[in-house]
């Protein structure tokens, strides 16, 4: 599903198949019991998803993030790792919509800016990408942020792409 500008919505990645949703709804209580937390407080499940992400188990983390969002939980500050899982599993279109959602919540995050810029650049949207990448660079005046350093390199790539046109 897309909005009027043909952009993906942050929730497009959630399955609308009733079977998938019913799986999460039916398993909700037993999952909470087996993991040792009340499902009303989903912090335990979120911590598990974050742990999977940190251990580079992106498919597993993605399943948990998607399930929590399908159940209506607000992932808040966890949209960034959620987006990264999509990016790292070869689904950049879904990652981009989540990075943009994460940037609404934390507009000065150099990682989100750089990752979204990188995806846009790979899609040939050079000027949109350059805008995000330049924001990331401007947030790092001392040149010690790794994401901003990557943004600098991607900006050079964008400049080469413009010259090649």
Image: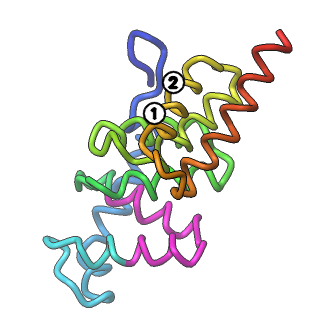
The residue pinned by badge 1 equals: 135
Q: In this view, does 3 lie above or below 53?
A: above
Comparing 132 with 149, the one in front is 149
Taking the image as shown, residue 84 lies to the left or right of residue 80, namely right
The residue pinned by badge 2 equals: 131
Secondary element at tag 1: helix
Taking the image as shown, residue 117 lies to the left or right of residue 21, namely right
Percent of width and height locating residue 10: 39, 36
Q: Is residue 137 above or below residue 32?
A: above
Quadrant of the drawing holding the C terminus:
top right
Name, please, the residue furthest toward the left: 40
Q: In which quarter of the image is residue 48?
A: bottom left
Comparing 45 with 18, the one in front is 45
Percent of width and height locating residue 85: 55, 57
Q: Which mark is residue 112?
A: none
Disc 1 to disc 2, how far (Cα)? 6 Å
Taking the image as shown, residue 46 lies to the left or right of residue 90, namely left
Labelled pair 1, 2 in contact (Cβ < 8 Å): yes
Q: Which range is magenta?
A: 48-68
Q: Is residue 135 a member of the stretch shown in magenta?
A: no
């Amino acid at each position: 599903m897309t909005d009027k500008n043909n952009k993906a919505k942050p929730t497009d990645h959630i399955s609308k198949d009733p079977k998938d949703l019913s799986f999460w709804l039916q398993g909700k209580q037993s999952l909470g019991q087996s993991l040792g937390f009340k499902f009303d407080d989903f912090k335990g499940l979120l911590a598990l998803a974050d742990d999977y992400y940190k251990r580079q188990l992106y498919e597993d983390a993605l399943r948990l993030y998607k399930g929590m969002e399908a159940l209506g939980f607000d992932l808040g500050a966890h949209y960034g790792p959620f987006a990264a899982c999509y990016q790292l599993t070869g689904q950049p279109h879904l990652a981009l919509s989540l990075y943009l959602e994460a940037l609404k919540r934390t507009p000065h995050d150099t990682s989100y800016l750089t990752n979204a810029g990188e995806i846009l650049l790979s899609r040939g949207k050079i000027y949109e990408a350059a805008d995000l990448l330049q924001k990331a660079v401007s947030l790092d005046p001392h040149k010690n942020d790794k994401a901003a350093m990557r943004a600098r390199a991607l900006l050079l790539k964008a400049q080469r792409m413009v010259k090649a046109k």
